[in-house]
Amino acid sequence: MISFESDYMEGAHERVLSRLVETNREPLSGYGTDVYCERAKEKIRQACECPEAEIYFLVGGTQTNQTVIASLLRSYEGVVCAGSGHIQTHEAGAIEYAGHKVLPLSHHEGKLDASELSEYLESFYADANHDHAVFPGMVYVSHPTEYGTLYTKDELTAISAVCRRYELPLYLDGARLGYGLVSRGNDLTLPDLCRLCDAFYIGGTKVGALCGEAVIFPRRAPKQFMTIMKQHGALLAKGRVLGIQFDTLFEDGLYFEISRHAIAMADRLREVFRRKGYSFFIETVTNQIFIVLDNETMRRLSESVGFSFWETVDADHTVVRFATSWATREEDVERLIDLL
């Protein structure tokens, strides 16, 4: 069985594992106060060209989203996102469990539209009864989106401008950020995200780490953010495990190198899907490929290939997702091509 189910099916990149083994016996302080966490933070600040950024390492994506959102919202506020956004569709109500409502808007291939966001906010405050409603307190986006699409710099700049007009923090989920930043046509950079967002995270779990995400607050983190992390189960006592991984991933451009490998593998698959006449549910340039399969073909492929169900088209067709990763092997891609 070959796996294209997701980008976190394997463990960690060999250089990351090697560094964890090399440093295993070193006695280090806990909770992210060790020398490796500090080194990783400095490397990330340099990559972001943001020397004043405050950076924290959290254990996983859901904990990161819940913790950051809870820290930025007041008790009467909710978070605005695309209806297809990860916090709305695939996090088991984690945001609501923390006491904040998710406020979904219509999406366009997974993306929010700045003009529609502005119209929503204008309508909210024009309602004479808005004091009795859940207030929009921040905006959530992801890059890449749940559909593997990318925001352009102009699109994110427009959303950021709306957020600043209404004094709403803009938070970007970067679970697959590495794959987005190296994709063809992407024009956003880490420095751009520092300029346009109030918080974002660099995903490790899906981009070469065993686990962990790096949250960046380009200007100032919420007060007592580490304590809030602990309340949400997102603070690792052995913070070294996260710091060492990010210190390695941001050494000599490894994070971007392994991300480019995933995109190269996805581009190879995309080319073959197109040549063999398969229908694309949505056009993407990242490591996620969405294909419409007839159910018999889906059944046949599933005997030898792992992929993800996405949604039903009709009684005879289904949308499935093939995802490549930093660990995808060329021989597995070629084997899949032979099976198509």
Image (spheres, helix red, strand yellow):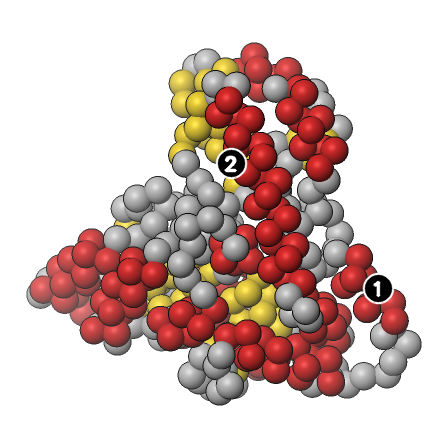
Q: CA distance from mark 1 to mark 2?
A: 31 Å
Is residue 238 visible in the rendered structure shown here?
yes
The structure residue drawn at horizontal position 78% and vertical position 62%, both measured from the top left corner, is 15
| Element under disc 2 | strand
Horizontal side of 216 relative to 132 (left or right) equals right
The structure residue drawn at horizontal position 88% and vertical position 71%, both measured from the top left corner, is 22
Q: Which residue is mark 1?
A: 18
Give coordinates of residue 329: x percent, y percent.
Answer: 72, 40
Viewer-side residue, 135 vs 4 = 4
| Element under disc 1 | helix
The structure residue drawn at horizontal position 64% and vertical position 57%, both measured from the top left corner, is 257
Q: Which residue is mark 2?
A: 289
Q: Is residue 143 above or below residue 250?
A: above
- Of the 4 image quadrants, the one containing the C terminus is top right
The mark that comes first in sequence, 1 or 2, is: 1
Q: Is residue 72 above or below residue 27?
A: above
Few, some or many residues within 10 Å of mark 1 (<14, 14–19, 20+)? some
The structure residue drawn at horizontal position 15% and vertical position 57%, both measured from the top left corner, is 119
Disc 1 marks a residue whose amino acid type is: Ser
Q: Is residue 102 above or below residue 10?
A: below
How many numbered discs sit on the rendered protein?
2
Disc 2 marks a residue whose amino acid type is: Ile
